[in-house]
Amino acid sequence: MTKKRKHQEDFQKVKLKVGKKKPRLENATDTTFKTKAIQIPEQLKEDGVLPTQNRKLNIKDLLSQMHHYSPGVKHNALLGLKDLLSQYPFVIDAHLSNIVSEVAAVFTDKDSGVRGAAVHLLQFLASKIRAEQIAPFFPLVSAHLSSAMTHISEGIQEDSLKVLDILLEAYPALLTDRSSILLKNFVELISHQQLSKRLKSREKLSWMLSVNPNRRVTSQQWRLNVLIRLKKFLQAVVDGSSEREDEGLQEQKDSPRSVRSPVCVSWKVHANNQQCIQLFENGGLRPKINSSFRLRSLTGVMDSAEKGLSSAENLKGFIEIIIPLLIECWIEASPAQSAPILGNLLESDSQQLMQQVLSIIHLLWKLTKRHDETYKMDLWLRMNYLVDFKHHFMRHFPYSLQETAKHKKKDLCKGNKYCMTSSNSVDHLLLNLTLCDIMVSLASTSTLQMDSGWLDLIRKFVTDTLQDGSKLNSKQVNRLLGVTWRLMQIQQNKVATEPLIKAVYTLYQQRNLLFPVRTLLLKFFSRVYQKEDLRTQRIRSRSKVLSRWLAGLPQQLALLGLRNPELSNQLIDIIHSAASRSNKELLQSLQATAARIYDPLEGTLVLLPAEAQRRLVQLVYFLPCLPASLLAGLSRCCIMGRMSSELAATLIGILRMRSSFAGWKCQVQDNSVNDVDYFSFLFSTLIGFSREELTSLQGIRGKPHISQSQLSPVRLYLTDLDQFLHHWAVTEMICHSLSTIPSQSQCFDILQTGICKYLVGLVVIPDSTAGSVLCAINKLLDQACILSETLHKFLASCCYSLLYFLLTLDKEDAEHLQKRDMLWGSCISALALLPRLLRLMLQSLQVSRICREELPVVAQLLRLLMQHGQLRSHMITNEFLVQQIIKDIMTLKSGEVQEQWLTDLHYCFNIYLASHPQGPGPVNTVY
């Protein structure tokens, strides 16, 4: 009993009491834990979530609603698409195919609100999608557009024109590629097919205008709307065809008006092997192909339907269909139908319709000129349509606008019979000019007698309009000049062309013409002049009006100045063209106006940009005579810096070619340039300053403009770096011109006389002038030249003043440091060529007269002269003189501590002069 109780005590159960906490077990596991929230909003988003609009619909939801049966749902989907795509433009690229297909599908929706929303969305998308992006999907868009244009519902047809406007504005090239289908749609919008009476003989179907009373607008207004779009479409076809190259070239030009840029060759640079000119086998548009292998032409694969209007056969077929319909539209709107009493007065609506009719015919005529067999096409057009055009179009010519609503504007039109009324945005003058353009294209020289009746009407209208054309705009003038040019080509005798040229000149003389109008008139006169100049017996048949126009161009150029550089460039080009053809009247006028054009202060030459200056400088070559006053002005233009040094060098070269020293083997113009005036020009340009400017410089004293030494009577005026470099570049060309004169000794005597007369005796001389004089002396000096003592002393003073200026330059003066090499080289060359000059300069170094601060400069100069290889022999010749200068310096410095510069001077003297080395050494010291 006792053992059992003890055994049970080992595993005794703990008794729990109510209200007491259960004791914790020793081997219990702690299962408590703590949590914290982690914010990762971007990572928690799913990849498939698309951006939504304010109604929480994404692109897929909106596109799916486009198939809903309810018009309201589709309308809201289109509005939601525009809202979504405006907020998230990147969605367009990702879903472009679906967006384009769904939007195009609702072009033919029955609900007008849905179609209107689709048009607005298409307008928005056209500004966001490029042509190359939508090109793969454009056949689908074009198919839906064709379906809308040929739909039975009138409302869908009307809205299809709005879609067409957007596509023509944004993607004209893509739309015109499907011209064969769309042109047929245009025809079906205003007409319907009718079986011909000759159907039994299998003649082709004919078309007649259709009338639909269910439309919201009148039939005439509907045709006007369609013809406006047809005109825009044909204009896009014309613009697109002008960009295309010939067959076999698939690349396109940059723009319809692009021209080939000429190769600019600088022969001076090319002669130094610094410019490479690449030559090609063929410079035309048709390269020569040597290979017998030929690629298959894409145009040959396409059938005639796919070629569109680029095929002559298709173009003829469309003309045969559309021209009768256009004539019917004209008949409905013509004055005989609307108001027989009014004659040729037109109402605004009728005028607009007639304008579109003529514009479409004019564009079709342009397309006929693009084909190879233009002559055959012209004959075909004349044979088929001239009779109808004369009967219907020329019956009430010229047409004018009848004003019914606004009577206050009547007074404004009294001065001009063919004025334009801006109230209704119509231009009846353009209507008449378009008609003239169409009709004169059907006439030729061979048919002149048959067409004389209506051609006289057109000629009278053109003449009257030109004579009273102060209010014409550029578009009207362009069409007017085109008709005038065609009339002059049809009848080329002077009796017929002179009144037309006179009428154009009357318009040209009008003041305050717009710049585009003035440009068109200049181009017209230039074209007429070039055409006339190519004819035989041109002196007998030359137009007096044209000669008067040419003679007035130089005066206009002088008066124009800088007010219109573009117009000035055009005038210069025409003047240059006529001057190169030796036009007598123009050359006389140019001679009379040359002083104003080449005035150095306010002349056209110094006011215009560089390219125009270059053309004006070239005109100097054609001047009949170059008097002294004109040469003086040209000299000032060269040295004032208002044109580049390269252009100044070109001008100097032109004057040299006009002089008697050019070395022509054939006889040149007599008395064109007087020899005395030519030398005066060269000397004035060499000096670089006028007499008045040199006189004003004599009163300037002290730094920073003056460099002065106590050992030289000549003080240097320090010019600006730009002025110095320009003067130096001009000097090089002057020296070249002087060196080409056959008699060098006489040329040197003239130069010596000029220097002694105008420069010797001056106290202040510009540094560029001193350097230029030394450069010219170095260039012209030879054994036959004899220098006067006065010139020797002047040159010696200039040399020392220049060398003193160069040796005292501050290293921080970067502007004047760039002059160092040019001035140093001219001084050393002059001292090497003229031993007498070196001796005079050494004799002037009387150190007893200078202050102690200038002694190191003199010592440095002597050291550099002794070290220079070219001057070694001359310095040995003047050894005693150099030794005396050194002794004088030592006397002034006696009793003082010998400085380093004095030690260097002694060393150089002992090395180079005291030992008398034979011959000049190889050393060529540059300080």
Image (cartoon, grey):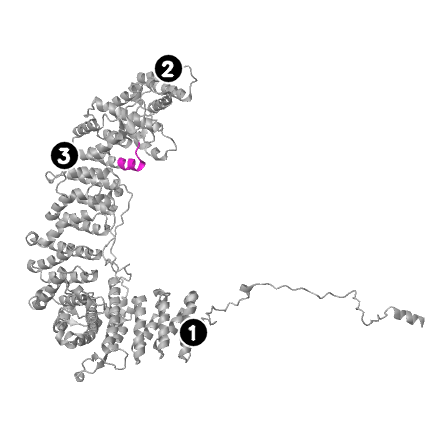
Q: Is residue 724 magenta?
A: yes
Name which quarter of the figure residue 230 lies in: bottom left
| Residue at x-position 17% and y-position 59% | 470
- Of mark 2 and mark 1, the one earlier in the sequence is 1
For this view, does 3 lie left or right of residue 834? right
| Secondary element at tag 3 | helix
Name which quarter of the figure residue 396 lies in: bottom left
Q: Position of residue 256 (x, y in %)?
A: 25, 60
| Residue nearest the viewer, comparing 737 with 152 | 152
**Is the stretch drawn in magenta largely helix, strand or loop?**
helix
Label 3, label 1: how far apart the Cα atoms are: 89 Å
Label 3: how many residues lie within 10 Å, few (<14), some (14-19) or many (20+)? few
What's drawn in magenta, residue-wise?
718-728
User: Which residue is disc 1 drawn over?
Assistant: 63
Amino acid type, residue under disc 3 in the picture: Asp
Q: Is residue 719 above or below residue 194?
A: above
**In the orientation shown, which residue stands out farthest toward the bottom?**
200
The N terminus is located in which quarter?
bottom right
User: Which residue is disc 3 drawn over?
Assistant: 675
| Secondary element at tag 2 | helix
User: Which residue is disc 2 drawn over?
Assistant: 891
Q: Is residue 620 visible?
A: no
Label 2, label 3: how far apart the Cα atoms are: 56 Å
Label 2: how many residues lie within 10 Å, few (<14), some (14-19) or many (20+)? few
Label 2, label 1: how far apart the Cα atoms are: 108 Å
| Secondary element at tag 1 | helix
| Residue at x-position 35% and y-position 33% | 817
For this view, does 231 lie left or right of residue 379? right
Amino acid type, residue under disc 1 in the picture: Leu
Amino acid type, residue under disc 2 in the picture: Thr
